[in-house]
Amino acid sequence: MPSVAFLVVIAISSSVDGKTQGQSNTSSGSLKGQIVGTTDGFPVAHSFVLVHAENGQDKTIVTDESGRYELELSSGVYDVMIGKMGWEPICRELEIRAGHSAVFDAKLTPNWKHLER
C-alpha cells in the first residue's frame, strides 16, 4: 500500500500540472460514492466497483476502509457494478457529464447462502 507521503506528492504534482497548463480536462467528470450495508449502515470496506463503458474499456477500483471510492471518467454512459464476497451485487447505469461529479452511494445486502457449500 502506498505511503501517505507518496500520495501527497502525487496530489501536489497533479495540482501543479493543472495550474501550469492553465486548463482542466473539460471532457471528463468523476464518479464517487460510499458503500454501506443495509442491515447496520456500516461501511463495506474493500468492495469492488467495476465501471463498464460502451467501448469495452472497464475500470475497477476498490473502496477504502470507510467504503468510499472516487475515480475520474470520460463523459458518457456507464454500467456501474458494485459487490463484495458475501453481499448481493448491485448495478446501475449512470451518465458522467463533463466537469460534474456523479454520486452512486450503494447499500449492499448480505448474502450468506452462496457462502454455504
Image (cartoon, grey):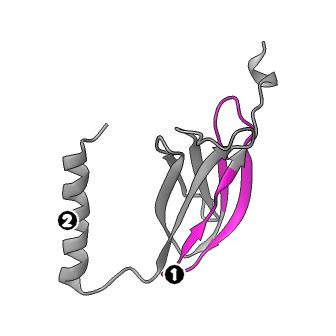
**Secondary element at tag 2:** helix
- Residue shown at 51% from the left, 51% from the top: 68
Mark 1 Cα-neighbour bin, 10 Å: few <14, some 14–19, many ≥20:
some
- Name the quadrant containing residue 51: bottom right
Percent coordinates x, y for residue 6 in the rendering: 20, 48
Q: Is residue 26 above or below residue 77?
A: below
Question: Residue tagged by mark 1?
Answer: 98
Residue type, mark 1 in image: Ala
Q: Split into 4 quadrants, where in the image is the C terminus?
A: top right
Percent coordinates x, y for residue 92 in the rendering: 73, 59
Percent coordinates x, y for residue 14 in the rendering: 25, 67
**What is the span of residues highlighted in magenta in the rendered image?**
79-106
Q: Is residue 99 magenta?
A: yes
Is residue 38 rendered to the left or right of residue 15? right
- Residue shown at 18% from the left, 81% from the top: 20
- Residue shown at 22% from the left, 81% from the top: 19
Mark 2 Cα-neighbour bin, 10 Å: few <14, some 14–19, many ≥20:
few
Q: Residue furthest bottom?
A: 22
Question: Residue tagged by mark 2?
Answer: 13
Is residue 38 rendered to the left or right of residue 98? right
Q: Of marks 2 and 1, which one's residue comes earlier in the chain? A: 2
Percent coordinates x, y for residue 104 in the rendering: 64, 61
Residue type, mark 2 in image: Ser
- Name the quadrant containing residue 54: bottom right
